[in-house]
Amino acid sequence: MTDTAPRTGTAVRPPAPRPAPGAPAAPGLPPVPTPAYLYDLAAVRSAHARLRSCLPEPSSLYYSLKANPHPAVVSTLHGLGCRAEVSSPGELDAALEAGVPAGDILYTGPGKRDEDLDGALGAGVRDFAVDSVHGIGQLDRAAARHGVHVTYLLRVNPGGGSRGAGLRMTGEPSAFGADAEDIAAHPGRYTGGRHARIDGLHLYLATNIADEAALGDSFSEAIAVARTLREALEVPLRTIDLGGGFGAPYARAGELPDYPGLAGRLAQELDGALPGWRRNDPAVAFESGRYLTATCGQLLTRVLDVKASHGQRVVVLDTGINHLGGMAGLRRVPPLHPDVVPPAGPGTERTGGDGPDAAAEPPGPAMICGPLCTPLDTWARSHPLPAVAPGDLLAVPNTGAYGLHASLVLFLGHPAPLEVVTDGGRIVRSDRLAFVRRAAAT
Ligand SMILES: Cc1ncc(COP(=O)(O)O)c(C=O)c1O
């Protein structure tokens, strides 16, 4: 029997060919082969500064690797002070590869195999989030096996739900968290054992809320739940992780939302509910994936074919649902209505089609398809597009979060796209995920 996945169950990223320091800046850059994700680290830094300005101080911020685990992105955010929130062996490896020390990693997720915990503990991780009484016992036994003491945040599923959320995570039957009512009724079940002790609460109520009032309401609910359970649990709670929900454009042109009044509102509510938070007693934490990375990325693609089909212009690209939007149909990311536009930035110089069959079709609505041998690989049935010919470059903006890593990369066996990291107009790293089949013990 063979195993399609390497040790961690995720794809292998070969060592990055790194250009020598001082590599030439645009316009001397070679054109980037497509399909390719371009990630701009300057945009990551600017999104981070913007988000920090919306958060009350003092507070810490976790970067959720599920949005984009590329090591250059993770290490940039860690360098800016973010800790890493990981929820799988592959994300743990990505954080460690990016240079995040194990002490700065929070290992979350509603279901963990014993070997996942063993791997994390062996790597030195000591902070976990757990979602159930069973999860606490499992972590306690794992820590005992390793002869160590660990702490956990107890993830809570409160009674209500958040308005305006892109995707509600709690307030309904869910794998995430223990019911707040049960924690309040049976606090002794949730405070831990000899090797794993509760450190605080983890409240992640929703994702992708662009409206400030709705996001504020979601945090208000989290703060109120934290206040109630802090009293009910009757043990010191050193950390209250209020989660996130910060919105971002997805595969469409647009700006990150601003939340100018959020820090003030939350500070006031924290003063009332958790006095001491200004002295880090408890320490307040937030989490974000998409806000920090969505706007750093664009997906570059080349036109492979253009034709008229039953009166409709059809444009076939060299990328599709295998590289972007694969999870849209599963409700895990917003529905995909991508903007497909002429690209911008270093490495994206328009090369244009050539050859006798490369005449551009006139502008107007086009059906935009990928190269996969399935009619499912259609990003849009009627999308405004300039005149294009085979060989032309196009781009989908704001794909730095839930792009490649929320897609169907193994479906139909095309290679993963190139991932190119730029900073200050220079390419600083370029690599490609590879998938290997290895023999496995059965
Ligand atoms: C626990 C937790 N933290 C962080 C995130 C990241 O969410 P976002 O990328 O919307 O910030 C998620 C998303 O599902 C999550 O479940």
Image (cartoon, rainbow, N blue to C red):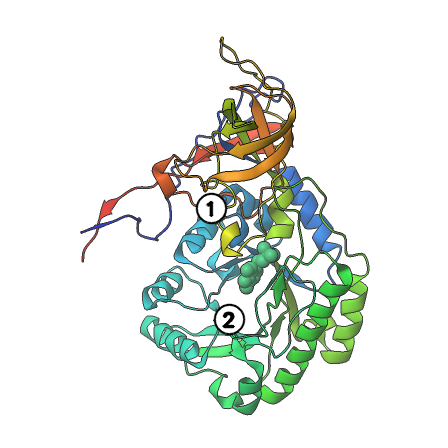
- The residue to which callout 2 is attached is 176
User: What amino acid is labelled 1 in the image?
Assistant: Ser
The answer to whether the residue bearing label 2 lies less than 8 angstroms from the nearest atom of ligand 1 is yes
Image side of residue 161 versus residue 435, left or right: right
Q: What residue type is labelled 2?
A: Phe
Quadrant position of residue 268? bottom right
Residue 133 % position (x, y) = 44, 81
Residue at screen point 47% across, 59% down? 102
Q: In this view, does 247 lie above or below 182?
A: above
Q: Which quadrant would the C terminus be assigned to in this image?
A: bottom left
Viewer-nearest of discs 2 and 1 = 1
In x, y percent, where is residue 107? 47, 63
Q: Earlier in the sequence, mark 2 or mark 1?
A: 2
Give whichever of 55, 179 is nearer the camera.
179
Relative vertical location of residue 44 with respect to residue 102 in this rendering, above or below: above
Position of 84 relative to 218 (above/below)? above
Residue 181 in view, yes or no: yes
Note whether 198 is above or below 366 in the view shown.
below
Marker disc for residue 407? 1
Q: Is mark 1 on a helix, strand or loop?
A: loop
Q: Where is residue 339 in the image (x, y as percent from the top left)?
A: 63, 37
Q: Residue at x 75, y 57 (%)?
A: 54
Ligand 1 image-quadrant field: bottom right
Dot 2: what SS? loop
